[in-house]
Amino acid sequence: MGQRVLRNRRTLYERDSELAAVDEALAELTGLGADGAAPGERSLGALLAFAGRAGIGKTTLLAEVRRRAAAQGCTVLSARGGDQEQRVAFHVARQLLQPRLAGAPEAELRASLGSWYDIVGPALGLCAPTEGAPPDQQGLRDGLDWVLTHLAVRQAPMVLVLDDAHWADPESLGWLAAFAPRAEQLPLLVVVAYRPDELPEHADAFRNLPGRAGGRPHGLEPLSPDAVAVLVRETLGDHADDAFCHECWAVTAGNPFEAVELTAKVHDRGLEPTEAGAPLLRDLAAAVKGSGLIARIERLGPSAVRFAWACAVLGTEIHPALAAAVAGLGHEEAADAADALRGARVLTGAETLEFVHPLIATAVYRAIPPATRVALHGQAAWCVTDDGQGATAAARHLLETHPEGDTWVVRQLRAAAGETLRAGAPDTARGYLARALREPPPAKERAAVLYELGSASLLTEPATTVNHLRAALQEPIAEPALRQHIVYRLSQVLAHSDRLAEASETLAREIRVTGDARVRLRMLSEQFMWDAFRADEPDHPSRSRRLARLADRLQGRDLTERYIIGLRTWDAIQRGEPAEVALHHAERALAGGLGWAEADRGFEVPVLVALAFLYADRPDRTEELFAAGIADYERQGWRGGHLSFAYTLLGYVRYRRGRLVEAEDLARSGLRLAERVGPGTPAHWYALGTLIQTLLARGRTDEATRLADDHAFREPFPAAVVFPDAQTVYGELLLARGLTKDAAAQLSAAGRRLEPRGIRNPSWCPWQLHLARAEAQDAPDRALATALDALTRARRFGAPSAIGQALRTAAEVSSGEARLAYLRESVSHLDRSPASYELACALVALGTELKDPAHLRRGLETAHRCGADGLASAARAELAATEGATL
């Protein structure tokens, strides 16, 4: 045994290039590079990946990485994926981060994590999940990014080591794969090892290394005959002859694990390492793996076999007492079995047991007879529950059992799903609930399980969610509140799947059979909301009248009443009622509170109320409400679709104010978030529309065109109402490209879609203004009539920005004194509005018409402040020409 210890202290065999890469990365990380810089002076992080088949030496190599990192004063975070723990959400993330955070008093932990405490705490097992809506997956990843980034900075230099990454749980692996490329910007070295054929697609960042890492992982090769010979002689003595050493290489194919185990068995058997003993090596090698390994364990006796089975079922970090309970062994019998398995090099450790190698764990697990394996998982579920580890620890074992109609199993799986969902792992929660459904649950609980399953897959698998929720409504439901929640959830997922008509019809059916007046009012408010977003709503004017009658008599006593009043606000904006009417209702809706992250509510109505102030030329109030709403989202950890909407619409607000540089940055942020949610979603259309409109205002038509082409921003347009209106923005883009006939066709189609619905406010959708410009050349009379109709509507609404923009359009399609009069009045109105870009356009147009340097100069300055580069260039050229003519 002393010889083996001596061997383990020596350099790893034929891993010189891999260790050189590690040493180079550690030198750069610690700032002790070849140039002799002081520690920390030029720390550079990196991502190193090592790929190879089972037994090739990945674990041994990573152990050496940890040793060298610690020797150089690095903080080391370490984790290992486990075959049995792949379905335990955040298992790897907890291994990495929990030891650095757990144990601190709650107050200290809250101070350290700040606003991320309630978001990442449950995922890392630092605190119980809070009630209410869970964080979205992107929000949780952002929180884990923040925690790891701050740890890396505070405890630099840091090395993160992940072994068996192919077995990491999907939540942890997806997060680390996305985060790992950022290591180069931090004092952090990320080192991972995996089996290349088993690495999931969502971890491809480890296959294609970024930046200085060189483009691909280090592939670990089998040992050469010479290396195996050195290994054999270090273990068995220098007298091992060449034929014996070569046969050791041949029977193990240079696999380091098998070679080490083979030489250990030769040593234990007292076999002479000579050519005469070489024929026995093949049989000994077979005993190292597969059926030979199992036969070796069976020779240790029934107790050792059952104990090994129990350990294989439990996975990694095995507590001996728990393994004994699963195996059904007494304390002394279990201790003897553990000793025997340690002596046979199957297990290692004392207070916590591990298999010597994952290959052994896999072989033992697969050797368990199927019926026995199922029974052991069932026993493990009971044992971990009795051990106080909770429903989530039991759930992974219950997934491996056969359905038997056991209510305890259903109860544990539902509890685990609730914990996991609130911790931010909906996919895992969905797996638990699907298994609970197969148990099956008692008939009286089936609707509740279906509802929970639908809630878990709400935004990730909308079609499946609809099926689950509709099935739930077919079940007998004793509690009216449960039925109502199912209906709300079903209408919500239908609406977010662009099936707004079905969402409205679902609510309408339930309204007809609901006896509770307050519940009926809540459902009516939801129906009004989804109808407001329907581009194909058949009877908008009728709904508008009913909404007005209802909202005008409500006092805003609860959230439902305030939502209805908020929808009345938006209806007034779209219809172009006087702005003061819309603002009156907006203030009524806000009076009792209208949060953006209310439980079981959408964010749509609070957003619409906030935007009402924007269209009525009070953008400061809009931004104030948006700031509060974004803070609500971030507190909840909602950083996917919700935050995308928030950033995009805030960019839209900045666009309307003429702060085009800020608008572009925000719209791009919104688009990045929307792309993480998925293409073609409403969030995607909002972000693209705002960004294209902003780029056009900045004079970057070619870039806007490429963006539209790259993201299929064209017909067919979404069934949901989005703003800015996608078809109108597309028409504006065509107009900017000089395609006036195509633009006119699209803008006319937008008008035919909006007019029957009573949506006639040019402040909300200026399709008439762009159409007038598109028609000006071929149909000047019609163009003027279109512009003047828009002007009439703008005057009725009364916002100076809407009137000023309509006046400028009327000027563009007019001539002579009328043109000049319209421009003068446009500047007058826009001067009293927050619409800086529109003011710059009007000033440049008026200055050009009058050949007046003062107006042109002011227009140029305003365009510069807005970031309207194209307009500024045109103003500069016109100013130069005007001043030159004057001279």
Image (cartoon, rainbow, N blue to C red):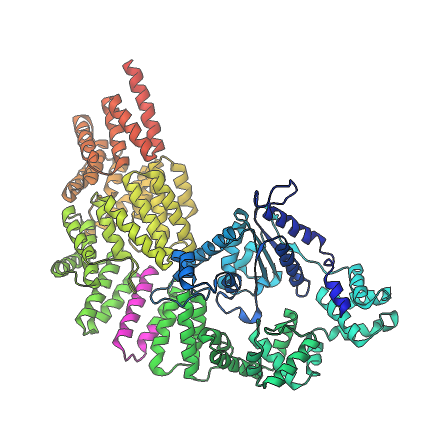
Count of picture labels: 0
In this rendered view, identify the residue nearer to me: 319 or 218: 319
Is residue 372 covered in magenta? no
Q: Is residue 473 above or below residue 551?
A: below
In this rendered view, identify the residue nearer to me: 668 or 464: 668
137 sits left or right of 562 in the view: right
Q: Is residue 712 visible?
A: no
Q: Position of residue 504 (x, y in %)?
A: 26, 64
Quadrant containing the C terminus is top left
Q: Is residue 591 above or below residue 688?
A: below
Quadrant containing the N terminus is bottom right
Q: Is residue 550 visible?
A: yes
Q: Position of residue 126 (x, y in %)?
A: 44, 65
Q: Is residue 591 above or below residue 731?
A: below
Image quarter of residue 480: bottom left
Q: Position of residue 288 (x, y in %)?
A: 72, 73
In this rendered view, identify the residue nearer to me: 525 or 717: 525
Name the residue located 55 percent from the left edge and 61 percent from the top edge. 200
- Magenta-colored span: 470-499
Query: Is the magenta region chiefly helix, strand or loop?
Result: helix
661 sits left or right of 65 in the view: left
641 sits left or right of 95 in the view: left
Is residue 494 covered in magenta? yes
Name the residue located 25 percent from the left edge and 29 percent from the top edge. 843
Q: Position of residue 633 (x, y in %)?
A: 34, 56
